Image (spheres, helix red, strand yellow):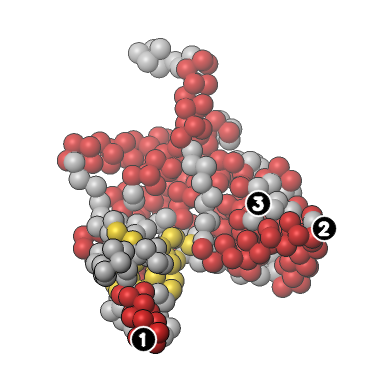
């Protein structure tokens, strides 16, 4: 089959099944800032019943329709999704947001929300406008957002081949950054999305359609070359990853330039990394605002009190291990009790 250039239907179906199994199932917009309101929503829903959740969803939907702000709508959608509350009224209201005024990060969060929950209930007209907007904004997306949006495109079922156009924009943006700037998992996500999408989107039998398919194949070949280089050299690029030590390159709000801390999660809806500075202060920063420390090595020890990671921990007489902030709090409480 390989020598003849013809792939039997059984092999083609097996390949699609394998690629689908590789596709990431994790929530693409995990953010610790959503956890507390989502937990409250779950707790009050258990106490007062489904009608309470529906009431909260209706209130959030009216806010979306009134203000039409994409960032606020994305936050509301992901709070409810984090709480596992798939309220259709929210997604209908989100179709009223102003896509022309939306940032690239807000559009990415909206696309992933619709793909995560209810793509089959969104109107085709809105999906087409949403995908068109992300095509325009793709060059502005942070690198970690590109593979997440690419996977969302596979499940979005966008009409009229617009998903294939969006995928082409994502691939171009990834090549522009350089594939060496992506983690191995991100390269896998990009390759899986790129390989799956042609099976779900009919490529028009025109010269432009053939050119698009050719560009897709060249992108996959480039990903393969990058992976082979990493395997042969035994080297992987040093990239930002949760748990790494970083330093702020510039002042962000009240956080001074040069402040160091531990990298938390990447927040898709904001296009920024959550950083927990030494001392416990959280700050959100763009990739270019961060300097990676210690060659990207991640601490393996965590504080027994607050569970924060640290390269150095204090070990007092009780046998525990504590960060400096918890040690100072412990010392202060001991002095007060004495």
Given residues 205 and 311, the one toward you in this image is: 311
Residue 81 found in image quarter: bottom right
Given residues 10 and 45, the one toward you in this image is: 45
Q: CA distance from mark 3 to mark 2?
A: 15 Å
Residue 163, image x, y percentages: 57, 44
Give the mark toward the camera: 3 or 1: 1
Neighbor class of circle 3 (other Cα within 10 Å; few <14, some 14-19, many 20+) is few
The residue drawn where x is 63% and y is 41% is 157
Q: Secondary structure at mark 2?
A: helix
Considering the image in quadrants, where does the C terminus appear?
bottom left
Give the mark toward the camera: 2 or 1: 1
Neighbor class of circle 1 (other Cα within 10 Å; few <14, some 14-19, many 20+) is few
Q: Which residue is mark 1?
A: 338
The residue drawn where x is 25% and y is 64% is 311
The residue drawn where x is 64% and y is 56% is 83
Residue 51: assigned label: 2
CB within 8 Å, label 3 to label 2:
no
Neighbor class of circle 2 (other Cα within 10 Å; few <14, some 14-19, many 20+) is few
Q: CA distance from mark 2 to mark 1?
A: 52 Å
CB within 8 Å, label 3 to label 1:
no
49, above or below 325, in the image: above
Residue 140, image x, y percentages: 45, 62
Residue 317 found in image quarter: bottom left
Residue 84: assigned label: 3
């Amino acid at each position: 089959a390989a020598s003849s250039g013809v792939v039997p239907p059984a092999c083609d179906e097996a390949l699609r099944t394998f690629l689908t199994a590789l596709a990431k199932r994790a929530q693409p917009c995990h953010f610790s800032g959503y956890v507390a309101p989502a937990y409250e929503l779950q707790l009050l829903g258990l106490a007062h019943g489904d009608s309470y959740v529906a009431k909260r969803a209706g209130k959030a939907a009216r806010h979306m329709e009134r203000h039409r702000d994409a960032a606020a709508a994305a936050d509301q959608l992901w709070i409810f999704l984090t709480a596992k509350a798939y309220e259709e009224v929210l997604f209908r209201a989100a179709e009223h947001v102003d896509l022309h005024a939306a940032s690239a990060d807000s559009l990415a969060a909206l696309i992933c929300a619709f793909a995560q929950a209810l793509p089959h209930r969104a109107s085709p007209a809105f999906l087409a406008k949403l995908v068109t907007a992300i095509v325009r904004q793709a060059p502005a997306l942070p690198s970690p957002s590109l593979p997440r949006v690419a996977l969302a495109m596979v499940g979005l079922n966008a009409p009229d081949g617009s998903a294939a156009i969006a995928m082409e924009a994502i691939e171009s943006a990834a090549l522009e950054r350089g594939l060496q700037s992506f983690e191995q998992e991100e390269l896998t996500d990009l390759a899986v999305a790129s390989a799956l999408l042609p099976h779900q989107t009919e490529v028009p039998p025109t010269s432009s359609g053939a050119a698009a398919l050719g560009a897709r194949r060249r992108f996959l070949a480039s990903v393969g070359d990058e992976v082979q280089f990493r395997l042969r050299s035994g080297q992987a690029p040093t990239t930002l990853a949760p748990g790494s030590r970083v330093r702020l390159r510039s002042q962000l709000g009240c956080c001074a330039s040069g402040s160091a801390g531990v990298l938390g999660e990447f927040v898709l809806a904001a296009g920024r990394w959550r950083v927990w500075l030494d001392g416990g202060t959280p700050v959100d920063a763009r990739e270019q605002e961060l300097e990676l420390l210690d060659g990207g090595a991640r601490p393996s020890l965590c504080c027994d009190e607050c569970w924060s990671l640290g390269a150095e921990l204090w070990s007092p007489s009780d046998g525990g291990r504590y960060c400096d902030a918890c040690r100072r709090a412990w010392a202060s409480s001991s002095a007060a009790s004495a």
